[in-house]
Image: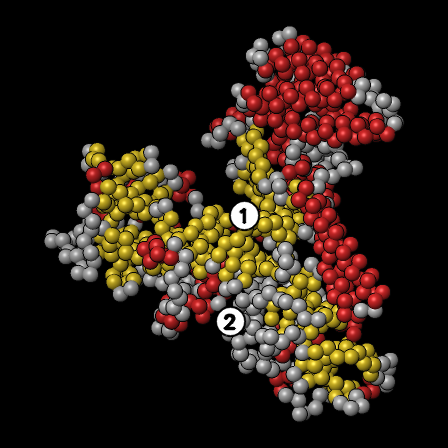
Amino acid sequence: MDGSPNIICTFMVGELFLGLEIGHVREILRYQDMTPVPLAPMAVSGLLNLRGEVVTAIDLRRQLGMPATQPDAMPDIVVVDVDPIRVGLLVDRIEDIVEVGDGRFEDPPDTLDPAARRFIRGVYKLEDRLLAALDVHAATDLGAGGADTRERGRGQLHQPSAPSMETRDS
Amino acid sequence: MEPGSPEYEVLLGEFIAEAREILARVDGTLVALERDPADADGLAAVFRDVHTIKGNCGWLGFGRLEALAHACESLLDCVRNGELELTTEIVTSVFATLDALGRSVDGLERTRVEGDEDFSGLIATLDALREGEVPAGAADDDGVVDELPAREGAIRVGVDLLDRLVNQVGELVLVRNQLLQAVAAGDAVTVGISSQRLDVVTGQLQEGIMRTRMQPVGRVWSRFPRLVRDLALECGKQVRLSVEGGDTELDRTLIEAIRGPLTHIVRNAVDHGIEEPEARTAAGKPAEGFVALRAFHEAGQVVLEATDDGKGIDVERVRRRALDRGLIGSEEAAKLADNEVIERVFEPGFSTAEDVSSISGRGVGLDAVRTSIEAIGGSIAVDSRRGRGTRFRIKIPLTLAIIQALIVRSVGLRYAIPQANLVELLRIEAADVERLIEHVHGARVYRLRGRLLPLVYLDELLVPELARTERPARDVNIAVLEAEDRQFGLVVESVHDTQEIVVKPLGRELRGLSCYAGACIMGDGKVALILDVVGVARMARMAPAGAERHAAESPLATPAPADSAAALLVGVGGGRFAMPLESVDRLEELPRASVERAGNRSLIQYRGAILPLLRVDELVRERRKTPREPAYDEPPADEDTIQVVVHRSGERRIGLVVDRIVDIVEGLPEVTHPSTRDGVLGSTVIRGRITELLDLRAAMSSIGAVPSAAEEAEP
């Protein structure tokens, strides 16, 4: 059932080699300064200015339950469109664009860290390594973020534990 | 100079633009002048403007127009030097002149030469009025202004915006040069940097150009004062128009789209809403009704409100008519709530030919209004009280919302506070903080001109840990903000300037944070959050400050309900009393020597009126024979001054004299023991002391101020 090859945009987050279908990726950027949002969910690193549009930046490390990005690190940004929202995902480093056939797609291995599991749809078996396919919906869902990592991220800002994502009718 | 020549075209263009500007301006001035004929400046302004038009007409050789303007100018001159009084007939004829000039200007724009409209009739009227005669038909307007000339072909752009656009184009040129060089040199790094810069500048330029399309809403209603005046005359009613927020901006196309609906609503208000003067006075209203137009930004939309104080929509009539027209079934008719019934007026087929009078309607029912509004993605709602008035509310989503905002700093970040919510700015030096900021058990307040202003520390709100840490005393900057009719002081680290900002919505993922209304991009390209003042106030009320938090978290503490009002605690004799903080108008310290007696009443002169005084222990009759000993921990009352809690109910004020102001508590607890004596509603325990809740109604009636039925009904 090998269909047309998928074009995947890849990047590193911690030890994980991750990828996203090019269809979801709007653009990739070098690091930009962002404005922190106090009281926002922990995974929110701040707000970016994307050609006049204000876009929320989500730290994938936090989502995946890893130690947060170091204050002096300059993560790359993968801007994704998940209708109806657009967010920027912070990743350690953007890697290459790869082509890979459907036939190579498998379920995530059991060795995968449970905290990261719900963000991975499956893995592609590449020649030399495994490419984990990121579930873009989970990645951009702020309610799904890692609940255990309480490290202080950039600056002195620390978000409270109470979920602040109740839907409000505004 | 030949018509058709380039010089002529240029001059004609300028003439048309200036004439339109003048005509729009004079319209408004004239309406105001009619209401206040003694306004010499207004009269001089109108005269000057008509004189200018006359001169311009002469310059371009428009003989007929010049003659008309001249006749009008001469008439105004007579009024100006006191020979004639400004009568309704004179005003109407001047309006007729302005209308004729307006039509001619439109004609000029199309044909490029002076039209051949015959103004001799109008000139004759003007001349007759100048002689002191009142020619027949002078007070008739040949057409109520309803269609406002479309102003296509040119727009006005603010000079600041234009400068910014010019700068941005300059940037664009620089980046372009940079990029070209880098590409030629094969310098990939610089190409990358320049591309990003190109991105940013193009975006800014795009936004800047879009902003030139933003026009103030006031353009739509600039002719409304005249419209209302003419309509009112025709209907035999007295109506005043007030406008607010005319500088709220909206995209040009949207402005055109709301012109019709707003006009219709205003006409409706004058024609159907406002009653005749006799009917109004009979109903206890002033003979003159008002129509108020208001425009403002709210949550990423522009809101337009049209309110009148007329007779309101007769819900029962609407219900019956909706039933008659088959718009609702009889079962439904019985079940629908009043406000749902009122919405039926927007249904097609609701209004009939009998409603369409010569004045309003003209075949345009409210259904057409709603259709027009919804076509641009907006919504319209109506709210009405029988006998009190009606309010239409139009909401239009914005592609661009631009507001004035004050930029402040807190926790090292910049925040924007909408100017609309800002009342004033205060600053307290570090040395005075101890003295001026009162700590009333967890709540910090500042006494602002006798009123207690609750303080919200922005840094503690945003970073709750800061509330628990000791911080050195520093200068305190307070922005006094108003939200939902309540004021509070927002304490920030520093205050910067006021800027015009473009409101960007926050992503859906962040919508749950009620303290933010959106974000904006500052001059340096960085993002700053915009505070939602209502959201901040709510968040602060719900989050107890500092040490209070621990008490509230204890399962034994009964939490105050989220929206319970704060209460003022006072000490009188040895006892404690409480009253809702909202019923406190002011807290005053007044000189004991100023208290006067009249019969068996105590009074004091207060703010230009007489304030009856009532000692709380007079109100609350003591059952004991011997007075209670004051509690040892309460300091004795000051001898020279008296502490007065001013309570207001409707138009009446009373000053309750107490020994001391003790505290402000968050939330008035339930009355645990019913009243055992006059003057109190009951008692409860607050902070470990028995506290009695004052019966303010009893206080008012004891000085003979019984609330009227109308006041009783007020929420």
**Badge 2, how many Cα within 10 Å: few under 14, some, many 20+?**
few
Q: Quadrant of residue B320?
A: top right
Q: Which mark is residue B622?
A: none
Q: How many marks?
A: 2
Residue B249 lies in what quarter of the image?
Answer: top right
- In the image, B569: left or right of B132? left
Q: Residue furthest left?
A: B626
Residue visible at 79% across and 37% down in the picture: B153
In the visual, does B271 lie left or right of B568? Answer: right
Q: Residue sitting at 59 percent across and 21 percent down?
A: B43
Q: Nearer the viewer, residue B331 or B416?
A: B416
The extreme front residue here reads B185
Decide: is B39 above or below B693: above
> Could you tell me which residue is drawn at 67 percent across and 78 percent down?
A92
From the image, state whether disc 1 or disc 2 is nearer to you: 2
Question: Which residue position is annotated with label 1?
Answer: B420
Q: Secondary structure at mark 2?
A: loop
- Spot occupied by residue B110 in the image (x, y as percentages of width and height): 83, 29
Scheme of colours in the image = secondary structure
Q: Whole-Å distance between the Cαs marked 1 and 2?
A: 31 Å
Tag 2: amino acid: Gln
- On screen, residue B32 versus residue A97, left or right, reads left
- The residue where tag 2 is placed is A156
From this viewpoint, is residue B559 visible? no
Question: SS for tag 1?
Answer: helix
